Image (spheres, grey):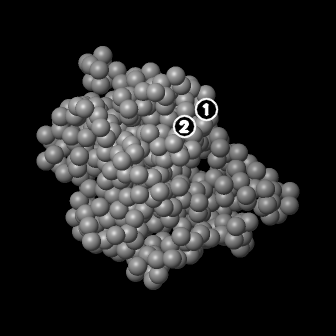
């Protein structure tokens, strides 16, 4: 047992090691499952990688922290092989030490899976447990961690942390700005200025047309894939194809490879899989284990199930249920464009037209097609009907915001609609929004220009935005 008198940064039992440019400390924090109900004694263990620049290990108590919040929902932070490049190096050059938090439910932070949920009992009990894994709880975990790491600092300013949020991480930052603005020194959001909505429907009305555009661009680059994809879809309609993990590769699941269209290099990665699958069908009449393994590896819903079962809840506030919004909007307005049943494809006005891929959207049938999600089906169905979601954003607080905020929104982003993001940025007082078509949704991981430009915005070095 560690004495409560020992500062977290002074503990000698913490595992640590060096990577190029930094020393990594692997820290765990016990957080309440429900931060607002003191009578609920349940806890979750939250993991964070603390990285101190090489040569500054003795300055942990004084260096300011920048907390990185990952995209998702449902994804952990990866261990960088080096902090000498990318946003890590930019943040270090700005004088920060780094904190990479595995948000609750991901990575090493009380991960959610069929295996871990079983211990919580009935479907109702499991669903109640998962309801505590949204942005408001993630933010309260970070606030508890901030207090532990900054304890003993003499000024209020030195106790604040900077925030960097990618995609869903930006949603979390906006919740943080709503709940604990006095704990934040500055905030940088990349591809994640959230729509201030009470339900997800408007998100999909905006993003399905963007996905149609990305499909058109894909087939313009790879026109021979029109025939290849049609051949694959026809085969998957006629055959029961089982993946190595026991999941089913249906036509509708194959279409979900289009999620890669939202990232730099995504067209090429999908084309490689299409070419491989079409070649298998041409030469052997079936898909090889190698091709099936690669396709499954390109889809992360089994390894990160929160990405499916909690995906639409990130848009729900004030008692609204998601009720499979992407599915409802698709069936009502975009069914023909994203048709997957072969007989219906042949009945379209242009039966030879391309078969379109889908993007970042989740559907109830995924609970049958994905092996891990099958085991979570009842929980997922319960969460989709849940009407108890509370408020994630306080528009009054955001309108009175004094925290310096810089955000990049990508004009062609098919994950987070730029139009909806622009409305939110205009709601957050003092938010400097940079809109660009130079990058896709993963711009932060592609170019150091993104974090460098945002820091310049915060400094006032760029004044024409």
Hey, which residue is sitting farthest top in the picture? 461
Q: Residues within 10 Å of mark 2 (few under 14, many from 20)?
A: many
Question: Which labelled disc corresponds to residue 19?
Answer: 1
- In this view, the residue in front, 34 or 423, is 34
In the image, residue 417 above or below residue 44: above
Classify the position of the C terminus by image quarter.
top left
Q: Residue 58 in the image: state x and y as whole percent.
A: 46, 27
In the image, 29 versus 277, the foreground residue is 29
Viewer-proximal residue among 330 and 262: 262
From what the image shows, is residue 369 above or below residue 406?
below
Residue, x 57% and y 71% (percent of image)? Answer: 115
Nearer the observer, 314 or 438: 314
Choose the circle earlier in sequence order: 2 or 1: 1
Element type where label 2 sits in the image = strand
Q: Is residue 144 visible?
A: yes
Q: CA distance from mark 2 to mark 1?
A: 7 Å
Residue 96 is drawn in which quadrant? top left
For the point 19% across and 43% down, the residue is 398
Residue farthest bottom in this picture: 122
Looking at the image, residue 393 sits to the left or right of residue 298; the answer is: left
Q: Residues within 10 Å of mark 1 (few under 14, many from 20)?
A: some
Q: Position of residue 77 (x, y in %)?
A: 51, 46
Mark number, residue 24: 2
Q: Is residue 420 left or right of residue 298?
A: left
Left-right relation of 220 to 121: right
Asked whether residue 189 appears in the rendered view, the answer is no
Tell me whether the residue at label 2 lies in contact with that at label 1, contact meaning CB atoms closer than 8 angstroms.
yes
Image location (x, y in percent) of residue 402: 18, 34
Residue drawn at x 21%, y 40% as measured from the top left:
182
């Amino acid at each position: 047992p560690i004495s409560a008198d020992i500062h977290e940064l002074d503990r000698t039992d913490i595992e640590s090691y060096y990577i190029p440019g930094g020393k990594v400390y692997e820290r765990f924090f016990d957080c309440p499952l429900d931060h607002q109900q003191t009578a609920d004694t349940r806890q979750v263990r939250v993991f964070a990688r603390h990285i101190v620049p090489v040569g500054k290990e003795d300055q942990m108590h004084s260096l300011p922290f920048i907390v990185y919040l990952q995209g998702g929902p449902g994804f952990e932070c990866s261990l960088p092989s080096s902090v000498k490049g990318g946003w890590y190096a930019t943040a270090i050059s700005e004088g920060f030490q780094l904190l990479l938090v595995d948000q609750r439910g991901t990575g090493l932070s009380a991960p959610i899976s069929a295996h871990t949920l079983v211990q919580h009992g009935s479907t109702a009990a499991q669903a109640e447990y998962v309801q505590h894994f949204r942005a408001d709880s993630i933010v309260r975990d970070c606030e508890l961690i901030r207090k532990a790491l900054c304890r003993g600092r003499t000024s209020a300013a030195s106790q604040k942390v900077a925030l960097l949020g990618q995609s869903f991480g930006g949603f979390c930052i906006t919740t943080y700005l709503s709940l604990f603005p006095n704990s934040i020194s500055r905030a940088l959001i990349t591809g994640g200025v959230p729509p201030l909505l009470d339900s997800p429907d408007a998100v999909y009305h905006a993003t399905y047309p963007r996905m149609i555009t990305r499909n058109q661009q894909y087939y313009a680059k790879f026109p021979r894939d029109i025939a290849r994809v049609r051949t694959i879809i026809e085969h998957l309609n006629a055959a029961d194809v089982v993946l190595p993990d026991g999941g089913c590769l249906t036509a509708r699941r194959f279409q979900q490879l289009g999620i890669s269209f939202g990232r730099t290099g995504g067209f090429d990665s999908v084309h490689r899989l299409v070419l491989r699958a079409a070649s298998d069908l041409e030469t052997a009449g079936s898909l090889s284990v190698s091709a099936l393994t690669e396709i499954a590896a390109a889809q992360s819903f089994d390894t990160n199930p929160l990405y499916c079962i909690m995906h639409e809840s990130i848009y729900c506030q004030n008692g609204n249920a998601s009720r499979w919004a992407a599915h409802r909007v698709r069936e009502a307005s975009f069914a023909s464009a994203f048709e997957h049943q072969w007989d219906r494809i042949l009945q379209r006005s242009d039966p030879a037209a391309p078969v379109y891929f889908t993007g970042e959207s989740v559907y109830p049938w995924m609970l049958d097609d994905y092996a891990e999600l099958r085991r979570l089906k009842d929980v997922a169905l319960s969460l989709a009907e849940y009407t108890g979601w509370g408020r994630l954003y306080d528009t009054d607080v955001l309108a009175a915001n004094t925290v310096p905020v810089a955000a990049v929104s990508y004009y062609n982003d098919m994950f987070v609609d730029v139009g909806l993001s622009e409305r939110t940025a205009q709601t957050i007082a003092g938010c400097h929004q940079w809109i660009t078509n130079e990058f896709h949704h993963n711009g932060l991981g592609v170019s150091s220009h993104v974090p460098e430009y945002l820091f310049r915005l915060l400094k006032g070095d760029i004044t024409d935005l």
